[in-house]
């Protein structure tokens, strides 16, 4: 089962440079990275609403639960998604696809290791150790190699 999950994660990761490339081109077409992000999120929102209504028929009766959810959970993911998507749209024409992906991935990994180590957001604690630090170091080397070549 873990192999299937790893494959699914790998395939999911493959969509990021495709999405970034498409959204960057969209930004050029509409002459604004912000409008491109808005279009991307609008389409994504509509798709998610449709999928949610089909996959979660009880959704309408659960809408009252929103008032019990902390504000930072309701707006944090959306705000950070806008920041990430728009940053990628701005970075890709300047850095290229590979460097954009690898530098944002390095940032993701450093933050993920911090979240794991400290157990932020109630995730299970996975302490920072030597092998994990070596992995980050190798990723940092990868950033420089991709930048140079």
Image: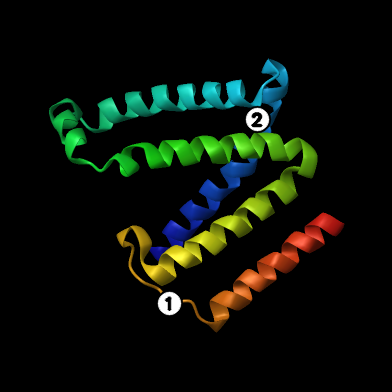
Q: Earlier along the polypeptide chain: callout 1 or callout 2?
A: 2
The one of 46 and 2 positioned closer to us in this rendering: 46
As helix, strand or loop, the secondary structure at mark 1 comes to: loop
> Looking at the picture, how far across and down is residue 111, in whole percent?
51, 60
Q: Is residue 37 above or below residue 8?
A: above
Q: Name the quadrant containing residue 96.
A: top right
Q: Is residue 133 left or right of residue 128?
A: right
**Crowd around label 1: few <14 · some 14–19 · many ≥20 (10 Å):** some
The residue sitting at 73% across, 49% down in the picture is 98
Q: Which residue is mark 2?
A: 22
The residue sitting at 60% across, 34% down in the picture is 86
Asked whether residue 58 is in view, the answer is no
Residue 127, numbered label: 1
Q: Is residue 21 left or right of residue 145?
A: left
Q: Name the quadrant containing residue 53.
A: top left
Separation of residues labelled 1 and 2 (CA atoms): 37 Å
Q: Is residue 132 above or below residue 31?
A: below
> Looking at the picture, how far across and down is residue 124, in whole percent?
33, 68
- Answer whether labels 1 and 2 touch (C-beta < 8 Å): no
As helix, strand or loop, the secondary structure at mark 2 comes to: helix
The residue sitting at 74% across, 50% down in the picture is 99
Q: Is residue 70 above or below residue 141?
A: above
């Amino acid at each position: 089962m873990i192999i299937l999950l790893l494959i699914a994660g790998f395939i999911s990761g493959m969509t990021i440079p495709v999405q970034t490339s498409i959204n960057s081109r969209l930004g050029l077409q509409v002459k604004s990275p912000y409008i491109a992000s808005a279009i991307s999120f609008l389409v994504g929102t509509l798709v998610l609403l449709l999928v949610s209504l089909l996959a979660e028929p009880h959704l309408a009766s659960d809408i009252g639960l929103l008032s019990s959810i902390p504000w930072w959970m309701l707006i944090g993911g959306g705000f950070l998604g806008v920041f990430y998507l728009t940053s990628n749209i701005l970075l890709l024409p300047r850095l290229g696809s590979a460097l954009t992906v690898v530098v944002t991935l390095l940032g993701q990994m450093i933050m993920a290791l911090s979240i794991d180590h400290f157990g932020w957001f109630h995730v299970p604690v996975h302490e920072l150790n030597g092998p994990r630090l070596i992995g980050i170091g190798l990723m940092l080397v990868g950033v420089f190699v991709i930048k140079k070549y």
